[in-house]
Structures are given as structure tokens and as C-alpha cells.
Image (spheres, rainbow, N blue to C red):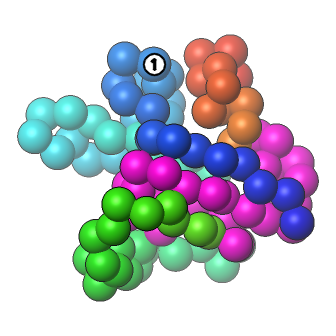
């Protein structure tokens, strides 16, 4: 299993437009899943995120896939994991150089 550590979700200033496809909240478009994934939870992620406790700790996602729950929950610190190392490499590239991924 490969992991990527995330300290914050990218803000609008550093995220490319294709990454900011979520509905606006308070006039700011937030990062959202940029991959479709088999078994994805995008349609229910908002409801799951509302049920999770707000925490200042680290969020651990063992089955990242498209990341719908991660993006809906918006933790300040996270460890995102998946058995697909190429998927984690993609998230690492987006984290480290979102404009360069284009």
C-alpha cells in the first residue's frame, strides 16, 4: 500500500481550473475529485462527511480511489493511501505541482 501525506487541500490560488470543479461555497470554488473511480462515493460523500466528527487530528483514507470522501470532508491534515501506486503518484503530482500536471 502506498500513501501520500497532505497538509492542506490546495487553495484556489495554486490549483488549476480543471481541479476546481466543485460547487462554489461562499464565492470560492473548492477542489473536488478529478478522477472517476469504480465504486466511487461521490454521490454520497457529502452525507458521509456530515456524519463524521470534526477533528483537528489527521484523517486516514486507506482506499482513496477518486477521493470523493476526502474532498467532501476537507481535512486539514490527511494520509491518503491506495494499493494502486500509480494513483498515489498522480495525487502526489497534483499536490506538489498542480499546474505542471496539465
Q: Is residue 47 left or right of residue 67?
A: left
Q: Does residue 73 appear to the left or right of 102 in the view shown? A: left
Compared to 83, does 3 lie above or below?
Answer: above
Res 66 visible: no
Q: Nearer the viewer, residue 89 or 36?
A: 89
**Few, some or many residues within 10 Å of mark 1 (<14, 14–19, 20+):** few
Quarter assignment of residue 25: top left
Q: Residue at x 58, y 44 (%)?
A: 6
Compared to residue 54, the image places residue 89 above or below, namely: above
Note whether residue 62 is visible.
Answer: yes
Residue 76, horizontal then vertical, whole percent: 40, 49
Could you tell me which secondary element the residue under label 1 belongs to?
Answer: helix
Viewer-proximal residue among 61 and 24: 61
| Figure check: 82 above or below 16 | below
Q: Is residue 5 above or below residue 65?
A: above
**Residue most toward the front?**
57
The verdict on residue 76 being magenta is yes
Q: Which residue is mark 1?
A: 14
Q: Is residue 2 left or right of residue 6?
A: right
Relative to 21, 84 lies left or right = right
Split into 4 quadrants, where in the image is the C terminus? top right
Identify the residue shown where x is 52% and y is 75%: 41
What residue lies at 38% left-to-right and 55% top-to-bottom? 74
Q: Residue at x 45, y 32 (%)?
A: 10
Residue at the left extreme, as displayed? 26
Q: Camera-side residue: 84 or 8?
A: 8
Quadrant of the drawing holding the N terminus? bottom right
Residue 24, given in percent of the width and then of the height, sits at 21, 42
Instruction: Give the x, y percent position of residue 5.
Output: 65, 47
Q: Nearer the viewer, residue 47 or 57?
A: 57
Does the magenta-highlighted stretch encompass residue 13?
A: no
Residue range highlighted in magenta:
62-90
Amino acid at each position: 500500500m502506498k500513501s501520500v501525506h497532505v497538509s492542506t487541500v490546495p487553495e484556489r490560488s495554486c490549483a488549476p481550473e480543471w481541479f476546481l470543479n466543485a460547487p462554489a461555497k461562499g464565492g470560492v470554488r473548492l477542489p473536488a475529485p478529478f478522477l472517476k473511480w469504480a465504486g466511487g462515493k461521490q454521490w454520497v460523500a457529502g452525507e458521509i462527511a456530515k456524519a463524521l466528527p470534526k477533528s483537528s487530528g489527521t484523517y486516514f483514507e486507506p482506499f482513496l480511489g477518486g477521493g470523493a470522501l476526502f474532498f467532501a470532508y476537507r481535512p486539514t491534515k490527511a494520509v491518503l493511501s491506495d494499493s494502486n501506486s500509480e494513483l498515489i503518484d498522480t495525487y502526489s503530482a497534483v499536490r506538489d505541482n498542480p499546474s505542471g500536471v496539465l
